[in-house]
């Protein structure tokens, strides 16, 4: 069932969303890149009548909206919405029309067979629903919602080379974001490995000659450096980047904004990790051979271009490259080196080793694994202080200095779960891994709904502010994998259980959750792709552990 607020009536491949207004009428808008739905309104004030009696919405399902009196609203195609029924009249702001058979509400007017439209829509619904991976019965309703979300978030994107991509949400996030695509692929791999592979290809198709994989592929092009950012993003960054150090820069352009100069923008290096996840479920040596070289070039980009001080440990050169847009880490400056980045790079080297070995390149595989071990050794030697892995931030040099001049380096005091992510390497000394697990299980990070993106007891903790406290499923998912890789399976299973319980009880597939209440955080969007994908993957893992056979969803 759709509530027409958090879960609008929409369909795979369509930009149209039908939603309920506060006055009980329906309104329709188009999903577009970096554009509010209020700016893309197609129709407002829709109501159905028979005589003087209004026909209210009786039920909204993935394949139709049903009104009292036997009238339905259905998609004829991605750009066409049709009312079917008889003896009814549709009224909307600025227009009206009789429903006697069919009435095209949005799209090109032409005759339709209403019964055929409804049957075709029901068939599309059944076909997608029938491919959902098996999950435990207690998680099935939320899993069905998650699978529906992944399906309707599939859109053709102008610069995606003719491929369908999963957008993070039709509420504003209409493009293929880099690490979102990797998490989406993890969920899709169970039912459509080819579609999962395409999420990777969309990004690699736009890899730059120097190896950088862009941050976003969208309808107007790609976002790969600060010159590609919307002006509103520079203003948003200026509200917090570097403010802890008192640095003030303008907010108008890449040259005078909080970052300064033209800076590459990407997302964390999880490409090989996602590729191997797909391969584990649906082996395809041709795909591995196709992506091996591009991922290796991306890996070298991180260790050269994104290591400006040349110490062997990569840095995020822009807040957006971390995926942690408003984390308190960035309050200290526009460059940072939290422990997650070099943990991802060590894991990526190991996964490149797995890919190389699968391709019969045994010497290269050994080299990649040696590099993974050496990178973890370097991370421990330089960033482990005996208690925690430290995060370093580099302040902006000030408005009068050259754009790429380095500022002061600060050790960030704010506690985040990024300092626990070296567990993901599976290569830490046992004593250090044990210390990280003890930190995870401490009151700083553990609770009924772990793991907050800023520690519960940290002064910067805010349960509703994006990366300053709420629970994000991708962080939990990576920590769960890290616990497994580091030999703490029981803790991993408990974190899995608490994560699934939180989402299952929370009412929807949100961008992030308030860790104190388990509810949707105040500014989180709904219908979020990676929350759906990772919830499904974790739930499917529980079903696999229980030896469950696939089961057709009820809807």
Image: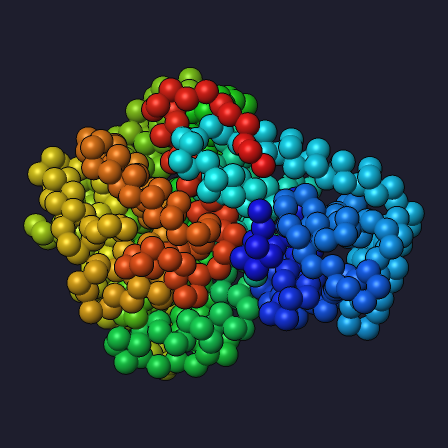
Could you tell me which residue is drawn at 53 percent across and 66 percent down? 229
Examine the image and state in which quarter residue 230 appears: bottom right
Most distant residue in the top direction: 360
- Position in image of residue 29 (x %, y %): 68, 62
* Left or right, residue 339 beside residue 543: left
Could you tell me which residue is drawn at 64 percent across and 60 percent down? 19
Q: Is residue 311 above or below residue 348?
A: below
Which colour scheme appears in the figure?
A: rainbow
Is residue 148 visible in the rendered image? The answer is: yes
Total marks placed? 0
Q: Is residue 227 above or below residue 512?
A: below
Could you tell me which residue is drawn at 30 percent across and 39 percent down? 496
Examine the image and state in which quarter residue 51 appears: bottom right
Could you tell me which residue is drawn at 39 percent across and 45 percent down? 504
User: Which quarter of the rendered picture does the C terminus lie within?
Assistant: top right
- Position in image of residue 68 (x %, y %): 72, 53
- Position in image of residue 377 (x %, y %): 18, 40
Examine the image and state in which quarter residue 244 appears: bottom left
| Closest to the observer, 508 or 329 | 508
* Left or right, residue 211 beside residue 248: right
Is residue 179 visible in the rendered image? The answer is: no
Most distant residue in the right direction: 111
* Left or right, residue 54 beside residue 514: right
């Amino acid at each position: 069932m759709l509530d027409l607020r958090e879960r609008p009536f929409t369909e795979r491949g369509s930009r149209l969303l039908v939603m309920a207004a506060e006055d009980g009428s329906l309104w329709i808008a188009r999903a577009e890149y970096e554009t509010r739905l209020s700016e893309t309104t197609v129709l407002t004030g829709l109501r159905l009548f028979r005589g003087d009696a209004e026909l209210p919405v009786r039920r909204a399902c993935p394949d139709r909206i049903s009104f009292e009196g036997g009238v339905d609203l259905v998609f004829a195609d991605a750009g066409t919405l049709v009312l079917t029924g008889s003896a009814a009249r549709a009224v909307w702001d600025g227009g009206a029309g009789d429903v006697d058979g069919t009435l095209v509400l949005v799209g090109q007017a032409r005759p339709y067979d209403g019964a055929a439209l409804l049957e075709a829509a029901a068939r599309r619904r059944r076909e997608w629903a029938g491919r959902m991976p098996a999950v435990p019965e207690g998680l099935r309703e939320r899993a069905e919602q998650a699978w529906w979300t992944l399906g309707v978030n599939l859109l053709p994107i102008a610069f995606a080379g003719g491929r369908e991509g999963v957008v993070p949400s039709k509420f504003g996030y209409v493009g293929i974001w880099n690490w979102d695509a990797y998490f989406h692929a993890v969920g899709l791999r169970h039912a459509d490995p080819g579609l999962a592979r395409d999420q990777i290809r969309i990004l690699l198709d736009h890899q730059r000659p120097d190896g950088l994989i862009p941050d976003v592929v969208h309808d107007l092009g790609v976002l790969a450096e600060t010159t590609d950012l919307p002006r509103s993003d520079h203003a948003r960054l200026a509200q917090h980047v570097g403010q802890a150090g008192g640095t003030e820069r303008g907010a108008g352009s890449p040259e005078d904004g909080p970052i300064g100069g033209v800076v590459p923008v990407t997302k964390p290096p999880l490409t090989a990790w996602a590729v191997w996840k797909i391969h584990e479920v649906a082996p395809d040596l041709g795909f591995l051979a196709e992506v091996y070289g591009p991922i290796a070039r991306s890996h070298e980009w991180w260790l050269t271009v994104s290591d400006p001080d040349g110490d062997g440990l990569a840095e995020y050169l822009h807040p957006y490259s971390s995926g942690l847009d408003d984390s308190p880490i960035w309050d200290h400056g526009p460059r940072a080196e939290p422990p997650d980045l070099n943990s991802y790079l060590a894991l990526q080297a190991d996964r490149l080793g797995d890919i190389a070995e699968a391709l019969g390149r045994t010497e290269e595989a050994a080299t990649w694994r040696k590099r993974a071990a050496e990178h973890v050794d370097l991370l421990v030697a330089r960033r482990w202080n005996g208690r925690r892995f430290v995060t370093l931030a580099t302040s902006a040099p000030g408005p009068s200095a050259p754009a790429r001049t380095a500022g002061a380096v600060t050790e960030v005091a704010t506690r985040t779960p990024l300092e626990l992510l070296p567990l993901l390497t599976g290569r830490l000394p046992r004593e250090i891994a044990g210390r990280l697990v003890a930190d995870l299980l401490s009151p700083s990070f553990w609770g009924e709904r772990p793991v907050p993106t800023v520690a519960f007891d940290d002064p910067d903790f805010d349960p509703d502010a994006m990366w300053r406290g709420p629970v994000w499923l991708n962080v939990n998912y990576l920590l769960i994998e890290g616990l497994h890789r580091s030999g703490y399976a029981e803790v991993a299973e408990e974190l899995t259980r608490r994560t699934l319980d939180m989402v299952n009880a929370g009412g929807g597939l949100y961008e992030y959750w308030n860790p104190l209440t388990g509810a949707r955080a105040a500014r989180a969007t709904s219908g979020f792709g990676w929350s759906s994908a990772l919830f499904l993957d974790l739930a499917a893992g529980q079903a696999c552990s229980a030896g469950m056979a696939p089961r057709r969803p009820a809807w």
